[in-house]
Amino acid sequence: MTNFISVQLKKASEVDLAKPLCKFIQQSYPGGDAQAEHCRAAEELSKLRKSALGRPLDKHESALETLLRYYDQLCSIEPKFPFSENQVCVTFTWKDAFDKGSLFGGSAKLALASLGYEKTCVLFNCGALASQIAAEQNLDNDEGLKAAAKHYQFASGAFQHIKDTVLSALNREPTVDISPDTVGTLSLIMLAQAQEVFFLKATRDKMKDGIIAKLANQAADYYGDAYKQCQYKDTLPKEVFPVLAAKHCIMQANAEYHQSILAKQQKKFGEEIGRLQHAADLVKTVASRYDEYINVKDLVDKINRALTAAKKDNDFIYHDRVPDLKDLESIGKASLVKSTPVVVPLSQKFTDLFEKMVPLQVQQSVSVYNQRKADLVNRSIAQMREATNLANGVLASLNLPAAIEDVSGDTVPQSILNKSKSVIEQGGVQTIDQLIKDLPELLQRNKEILDESLRLLDEEESTDNDLRTKFKERWQRTPSSDLYKPLRTEGANYHNLLNKAVQADGQVKERYQSHRDTIALLCKSESELNAAIPSANPAKTLQGSEVVNVLKTLLANLDEVKKEREQLENDLKSVNFDMTSKFLTALAQDGAINEEAISVTELDRIYGSYTQKVQESLKKQEELLKDIQNAHQDFSKMKQSNNESNLREEVLKNLAVANDNFVELLSNLKEGTKFYNELTEILLKFQNKCSDIVFARKTERDELLKDLQQSIAREPSAPSIPLPTYQTTTAGGSKPAASSTPTPAPRTMVGTKPQPPARPPPPVISAASSPSSASAPSGTPVAPAAVPAPASGASAPAASTAPSQAQGPPYPTYPGYPGYCQMPMPMGYNPYMYGQYNLPYAPSPVYPNPGQAPYPPPQQPGYPFPQQPYYPQQ
């Protein structure tokens, strides 16, 4: 009687998880021990999948443990890797567990680039394997009963979890086996079987009959609900439906049987008989309808013995009235089972392979925080650099400090010599020329990488559009145009970056051309510089005056501000604070991360003092520049004004400006070179991302094309062809009406013996034959004169009927013509193979091998009649 239902496992296609995961790790994490460790974990995960899904699993706890560990790993990596069609793209392919395939091969399967789909299918296999393990338990001992109940309840919980989550996990229609209806029914079946196990244990432990009856009644209720759910569905294997129906009756019968014992104990002998009669009717139904699936002979005998004894006692002793079935009190229900909820980790031996890798939400929060941090630091540095450039520009316009250093009027001021030396040490115009020359090559390299990446997307999208146009609604996958939107947006951003970089390069080149001569002058030796600068006779009385001393002090203070600013810039760049722990704590406490609030608070705490120092530096410089300009005005009034002095001062100003321009141009060009090199790495990652998704789409496309080909092969190649008119008859058996078209020449009839007929006499048609032929009833076979015995299986025509056409061998006339008689066809007959009517005699069917169709032998020479042409029916 204990015939339990177990669920088949789904089959998965092989997938290499290590390669795409390692690619993502290498792109997202800096090199070193952490990256190597994560890659090793990815390889271990791929091995675990092969162990869990790549081989047949034994119906044992260890096999289930492997499946559970793999499911736990999937749950642990889900928040850490962005599995999707346009990021970490891994296509998982699973077959329908209940689909048997078709004559042409293939079976229902679904391929999705979704980790949720993989989790759903793995959990299905966990439930299925648990049901198989439970079905293998020895229910004659307590250990087997406990193990079976535990596994059935776990299987029920697994299927229930799939029912609740499958639609959100897939975002599309699942295969039948994991559809909510199917897994909901499976969950109820597993729960019913777990309840039945508790009933068996209660029976084994000889608990009170009232309790046993309630347990059995609850099991019957579960089986009845499962029976109703799959009554009008054909998704589950065909043997499930009768087993559920039988189990429903059996559990009801057991409930009635044990309740009858309770009634006997309460001296309700009529109720005892009524319940036993109902139980007997139930098991009789099972024995008559479902005996092929469940043997209930022992239960039938037990109930019948109890019923016979109860009737005998009641007839001779108690004479209690037997109530109707509808008048019996309902048996209560007692449920001792419930679906085991799916709480990760499911495995007791689970260890997170990616324990040191932070969740993706934390990664994203850290990335946004780093962007906020970079914006803040860059903004502060930009403010300081702009202030420094402003100060340099103001000093250059005032010819400071060269003006107060120019004592003799015919030597190069020390500040100019220092600037010249600095420019020469940094390579001068040669360095600038080389950097400008390298920019187009770097730009071109980046453009080629970006263009190649977009070309890959364009080609795949074009192929996808062509196939979508060809197969129309059959081509059921995400359109490439929709899937590539994020990548195309990213590519457009890179394209805009390159365009802006080209504009910036043009501005740098233009600026360099306007200052190249002055910068080149700074690169010359001291003697050449001295010769290039006009001489003058400055007022020596100004040297050592109060105004000059004030200017020197102010310039020194400004230099100190610049040095402090350089140190402050280095401090801002060197500050590093890992926000991972902060975000992990927030995620653990709240289940979500308010990145903006956390980041703003931490940035203010870490960089608040630095930003305050930046503002103080800017304010101090503003005050110093104001004082320098006022002091310079006094200095200019005291200077002797002459043309030579003005010309010399102008050249010195230009040299100071040239130095500032050189420093800024060199910085811009180095930053541009760094930008292009860094962009190359980013674009290479973008290219890899594009090539990966294109490869994944190609694999998916090939798989879908293969499935479509198999689907098309299983379909009929043409619509059903109506039978020819000569094979159609009316309900009364009459043949089609005679046609006025001339009767074609007779053809040979396939008979039973390959013997050519004797040469017939010349046809003689009398005038009197026409009325006789015309008077024959429509559809009546007309036999020629002197016809040999018909072939076996054919009815002999009436001998008295006059022939309707030229006499000869027993050839049937063509359908649609007078006198046509539909003859029985031999095995293997094909009404469309007209060539068989051209045989000189009727061949016997020859079967050289079992199942091989007959074929006609070659035409024998010497047959007296020529081959007759075929006349198509009009």
Image (cartoon, grey):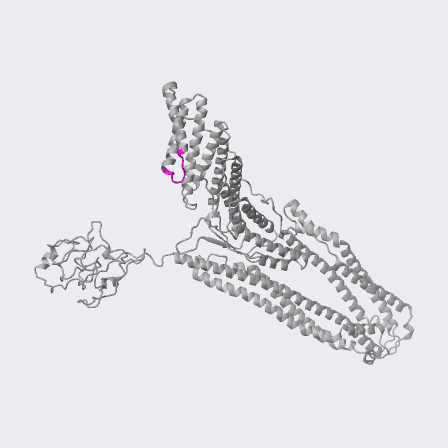
Residue in the picture at 26% in, 63% down:
857
Camera-side residue: 440 or 324?
324
Q: Position of residue 315 (x, y in %)?
A: 36, 21
Q: In this orientation, which residue lies closer to the viewer: 187 or 760?
A: 760
Q: Is residue 525 left or right of residue 246?
A: right
The quarter of the picture where residue 762 lies is bottom left
Q: Quadrant of the C terminus?
A: bottom left
Q: Is residue 748 left or right of residue 673?
A: left
Q: From the viewer's perspective, is residue 166 above or below residue 499?
A: above
Q: Which residues are magenta?
A: 289-297
Find out whether residue 367 is within the magenta segment. no
Query: What residue sits 46% from the left and 62% below the top?
Result: 467
Q: Residue furthest top?
A: 317
Q: Is residue 748 above or below residue 320?
A: below
Q: Is residue 115 visible?
A: no
Taking the image as shown, residue 114 lies to the left or right of residue 662, namely left
Please check the rendered image and state whether residue 293 is part of the magenta-colored stretch, yes or no: yes
Q: What is the x, y in percent for residue 302?
A: 41, 30
Chief SS of the magenta region: loop
In the image, taking residue 789 as reference, residue 224 lies left or right, namely right
Residue 123, x across and y down, in percent:
53, 47
Q: Quadrant of the N terminus?
A: top left
542 vs 352, nearest the viewer: 352
Number of numbered discs on residues = 0
Provide residue 69's location: percent of width, then percent of height: 58, 48
